[in-house]
Image: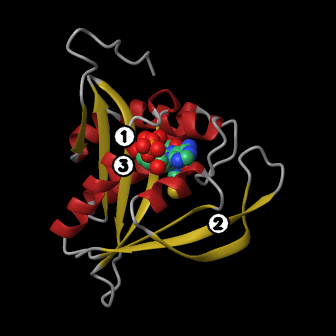
Amino acid sequence: MTALPEPTARGRPEVVIRRLDALSARRHLDDLADLLVDSVEGGASVCFLAPLAHYEARDWFAGVLHEMDLGRRVVLAAFLGNLVVGCAQLVLAWQANATHRAEVQKMLVHRSARRMGVGARLMRQVEVEARALGRTLLILDTETGSDAEHLYSHLGWIKVGVIPDYAMRPDGSGLRPTSLWYRQLD
Ligand SMILES: CC(C)(COP(=O)(O)OP(=O)(O)OC[C@H]1O[C@@H](n2cnc3c(N)ncnc32)[C@H](O)[C@@H]1OP(=O)(O)O)[C@@H](O)C(=O)NCCC(=O)NCCS
């Protein structure tokens, strides 16, 4: 990712959160892949081991596009000017008895844009999209003790418990626990 835009006299461009349609997601495939590579490089436990090659991240997002086409996933991106600085996904439960439920996945903010409120903005918009789709129960899992846990707790999510030895650290140095979280929307 190129450098963040410098603040001008009128301040830094505002972060805008947009739901991507399949066409714009295809257009931003490289940006989304960059975000994933950056997070894995930074040690985030998001299903991949380091080093994650750009083409592997791109391939993974190509699979996401397929699920978007099938109406199973919603992808949001955070733009700072023209830069994609964050993303989040909502995976819609397909089971007949779970059409009220969705899972939040791949909440990623580029390391250069963290602690600026982007993650919180993304999650708020995830909730708006979920409500609009009739999804009133959101679930997710994340590495226990990660930065993401602070975000979810800050946003009122409820932690259910911890599963030990859930996933390998991105650097392959050992297994780490994961925490399960949920949030019920009004
Ligand atoms: C988790 C993540 C998405 C947070 O994004 P972010 O844009 O930096 O978060 P925000 O700036 O919106 O933070 C909102 C609040 O969450 C909490 N928070 C977020 N990151 C935190 C951190 N590293 N330490 C402590 N609190 C934190 C704070 O309360 C913060 O408010 P404050 O800055 O006013 O104190 C980002 O760190 C990230 O991409 N991590 C790597 C990928 C990852 O692990 N994703 C989760 C997969 S489930």
The spot of residue 103 in percent (x, y) is: 40, 68
Between residues 148 and 150, which one lies in front from this camera angle? Answer: 150
Discs 2/1, front: 1
Tell me how far mark 2 sits from mark 1, CA to CA: 23 Å
Amino acid carrying mark 2 in the image: Thr
Q: Which residue, given by chain and number where applicable, does mark 2 sit on? A: 178
Please state, as top left, top right, bottom left or bottom right, where the C terminus lies in the image. Answer: bottom left
Amino acid carrying mark 3 in the image: Ala
Mark 2, secondary structure of its residue: strand
The spot of residue 109 in percent (x, y) is: 45, 39
Q: Is mark 3 within 8 Å of ligand 1?
A: yes
Q: Is mark 1 within 8 Å of ligand 1?
A: yes
Residue ID at (44%, 73%):
182
Q: Which residue, given by chain and number where applicable, does mark 3 sit on? A: 120
Amino acid carrying mark 1 in the image: Val
Residue ID at (40%, 66%):
156
Could one spot residue 59 in this view of the protein? no
**Residue at the farthest top position:** 9
Specify whether 154 is left or right of 95: right
Tell me how far mark 3 sits from mark 2, CA to CA: 21 Å
Mark 3, secondary structure of its residue: helix
